[in-house]
Amino acid sequence: MESVAIVGTGLIGASFGLALRAAGFEGPILGVSSERALAEALAAGAIDRGVPLAEAVGQADLVFLSQTIGRILDTLRHLDPLLRPGALVTDAGSTKCEIVEVARQNISRGQFLGGHPMAGKETRGAAGAEAGLFRGRTWALTPDDRSEMETPAAREFRRWLERIGARIVTVDCEMHDRMVALYSHLPQLASTALASTVSELGADLPGLLAGPGLADMTRLALSSYDLWRDIVATNSELIERALAAYIQKLEHVRENLRTRQLQLEFARGAELAGKARGSGLR
Amino acid sequence: MESVAIVGTGLIGASFGLALRAAGFEGPILGVSSERALAEALAAGAIDRGVPLAEAVGQADLVFLSQTIGRILDTLRHLDPLLRPGALVTDAGSTKCEIVEVARQNISRGQFLGGHPMAGKETRGAAGAEAGLFRGRTWALTPDDRSEMETPAAREFRRWLERIGARIVTVDCEMHDRMVALYSHLPQLASTALASTVSELGADLPGLLAGPGLADMTRLALSSYDLWRDIVATNSELIERALAAYIQKLEHVRENLRTRQLQLEFARGAELAGKARGSGLR
């Protein structure tokens, strides 16, 4: 791997550049993004130069798409004629099946391997980028077939992921999307809906008696709709199913506030919550 | 205030004893609890002696009921004949109107003033007690009438609360119970129901791709049903109403995953979440 193109130099893209550099990558790292995002990424030392897409992709062995999901889909539709034959194209989109499908239809000169680094922070943009952002965090890879993991380009990419400290998890895109619907998208929407409900019902209250529980339960609600619009749109069927199950559970809790059923729900919930704190669900 | 009886020497009761001592209270602090809880409170230095209820209450100027809500209600029904005339009886129950009502019907030799220290931690029992547990935290007092705050006994109690660092908020029991239904009880049940839903839907998943969001959203689900049974039972009407509004909001989100309505919910939720982090809702 001699040259890398990072398309979308926000928090994830710029952190990937910094991480590669810190792990000893010495080739050029080219950025493709808006003028402002490129300036931030340059200032952070995450890329060497900002160039147009065709120029960056034309010389890269690894093309890393770290845009929003909608823009990744768009880039995939125009990327193939620009690719170096044999280049590896990968991405950082938070949902995978739609991206994998569009890549399957459009990428033929190079190899596409879907990815999802499960890292982030509350700030956005290259200004908050960190070389250690992926250290100890899961980086999902979603090949259609396991053989895709063993091409020379994929092997080299995986070696770099290991060097930057990511924990690679290989899973097909359907399983990935089911898991994130449940473990990430449902909690996000539960938090947003809770915060919105509290806002409406509490509009006439002086707002003094809240403890740290509400702050915990609404932290995710600080997330930006700009990121979530595409996530929700590209995983809506599984999210609808998860929301339906959650609504049904809340109805059950509401109908059983004074019965032993509530005790069962507390027991079941506490067990899962314990696992979410251990290594099992991280 | 020369002598204090702490009825129920768990985390809150024992921390109150330690806090009084650390703030310079020099009179006897008598504990009433199970043998095991008394041994823990003695070992923690939170009480001077464990004695039967009649003995403790017969000599106390301040009687602090820090049991579960069900036991507080029970104690209030038997307490009056044992009280020193003019003693102040207060409590630490997490819901207030039912307790205030039972006290109104049963306490006549002393003064009852409902209270709710909004402090806690994940561990239970006197072994985890801390003199600083109430420092900077809200301590709600729920008089029926403001004049109850100005009796000599109430004034002295309030001075001690200030000395232990609590932030006194005066509010009637109806307003208190509305606020905690929304800011504390709804988030608790949302967390428990979420964890239980994830446990059921994820039963066949390998459970690898969860980030810190799920851990945040299920922290409250670790709470003990033993504490929540009484809270839910004594505030069920307001909790049902809050749950109904939350369910309705989730239905709205589910029906609008691909419309601009979702953006409005994100905006409303983020605003509330910001306030929950500032001083406004703490």
Image (spheres, coloured by chain):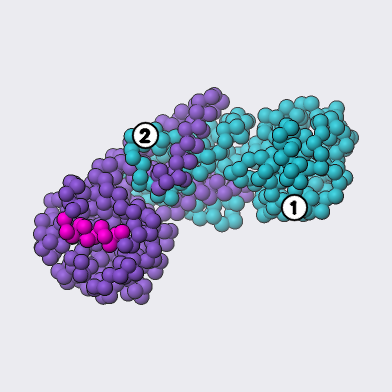
Chain colours: A cyan, B purple
Span colored in magenta: B151-162
Q: Residue B239 occupies which quadrant of the picture?
A: top left
Of residue B43 and residue B159, the one placed in the foreground of this image is B159
Query: Which residue is at 43% across, 50% downward?
Result: A212
Of residue B279 and residue A211, the one placed in the foreground of this image is B279
Give the residue at mark 2: A203
Q: Is residue B152 magenta?
A: yes
Amino acid beneath label 2: Ala
Query: Magenta stretch mostly in which secondary structure?
Result: helix
Element carrying mark 1: loop
Residue A138 location, x and y as percent?
Answer: 67, 49
Relative side of B140 to A198, left or right: left
Amino acid beneath label 1: Ile
Relative side of B217 to A174, left or right: left
Of residue A279 and residue A18, the one placed in the foreground of this image is A18
Residue B47 location, x and y as percent?
Answer: 29, 72
Q: Which mark is residue A164?
A: 1
Residue B11 location, x and y as percent?
Answer: 35, 63
Query: Which residue is at 85% across, 43% downward?
Result: A28
Relative side of A51 to A195, left or right: right
Tag nearer the camera, 2 or 1:
2
Q: Is residue A33 above or below residue B48?
A: above
Chain containing mark 1: A
In this orientation, does residue A129 appear? yes
Query: Which residue is at 67% across, 33% downward?
Result: A68
Of residue B72 and residue B173, the one placed in the foreground of this image is B173
**Residue neighbourhood size for the residue with mark 1, other residues' Cα within 10 Å, grouped as few (<14), some (14–19), many (≥20):** many
Q: Is residue A94 above or below residue B86?
A: above
Element carrying mark 2: loop
Chain containing mark 2: A
